Image (tube, rainbow, N blue to C red):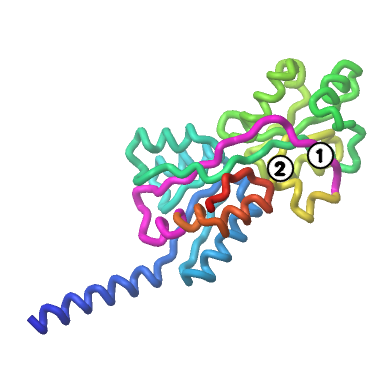
Amino acid sequence: MRFLNYVIGLLVLVSAIQVHADNIHIAAASNLRFVLPELIEEFEQQSEHHISVSYAASGTLTTQIQHGAPFSLFFSAEPRYIQLLINENLTQGTVINYAQSQLALFAAKGSNLIINDGLESLKIALSLGELNKVAIANPQHAPYGQAAKLSLEQAGIWQKIQPYLIVAENASQVMQFSLSTGVDAGFVPYSFIIQPQFSSLGRFIKLDITLQQQAVLLRMTSVVGQLFLDFIQTKSAQNILIENGFLVEVNT
């Protein structure tokens, strides 16, 4: 009996060591590029685990996961991509609605576009023949591109603005394009434009559209994946999200 107890204790110790040493790789939508490092830093300080991240458009990451990419967690900027993975039995556990992100229209200092009135400025520039280029993420696989398209459709100018669009792979690239000469404006994550490195480079206006942010464990996850998902739902993590421009219902 003593020997059996010793073996059981040894197995528990080995398991604990494995969890302690576990590193995970997660897939995250590009709009998390500035807030996720801060969240990971706090988690790693509390847990001593290590997390690495691959950023891309949610649709691109979904395709990678479908083809066997070894991610433990998926943070999507649009629920339908997670639903695709659920339908293919590539996830486990409960989907978490951890925040909502916001869309902004940004014009760099070199742009002559007046954006105080939101998309009306684009309408006016179009009608006067004064519009150069407008940057959006690719609506085929990028949620921020899909949100930008919806905004332009609601404004009644989606078709008219087609010749003026410069299409980026993801939200991060839209930010780069928006700062380029000859680009009047870009549809960017609000969480980007409030960052110190960008906020002084132009002007912006928040648009009346939000994107539901979801996270889910994937089939190849580990204990650390669940720990990080639990951390994202803590008040500490929620406060970090809010400070970075996300809308969150704070747990009490």
Image: 218 above or below 79: below
- In the rendered structure, find residue 190 and report the number of the disc placed on it: 2
| Residue stretch in magenta | 201-229
Residue 206 shown in magenta: yes
Quadrant the N terminus occupies = bottom left
Q: Where is residue 136 in the image (x, y as percent from the top left)?
A: 70, 33
Labels 1 and 2 touching (C-beta < 8 A): yes
Q: Position of residue 133 (x, y in %)?
A: 81, 30
Q: Which residue is drawn at 66% across and 35% down?
A: 137
Magenta segment includes 125: no
Q: Mark 1 points at which residue?
A: 204
- Left or right: where does residue 55 sit relative to residue 228? right
Q: Residue sitting at 41 percent across and 52 percent down?
A: 70
Q: In this view, does 205 lie to the left or right of 98?
A: right
- CA distance separating discs 1 and 2: 9 Å
Q: Earlier in the sequence, mark 1 or mark 2?
A: 2
Q: Residue furthest left?
A: 1
Q: Position of residue 9 (x, y in %)?
A: 21, 78
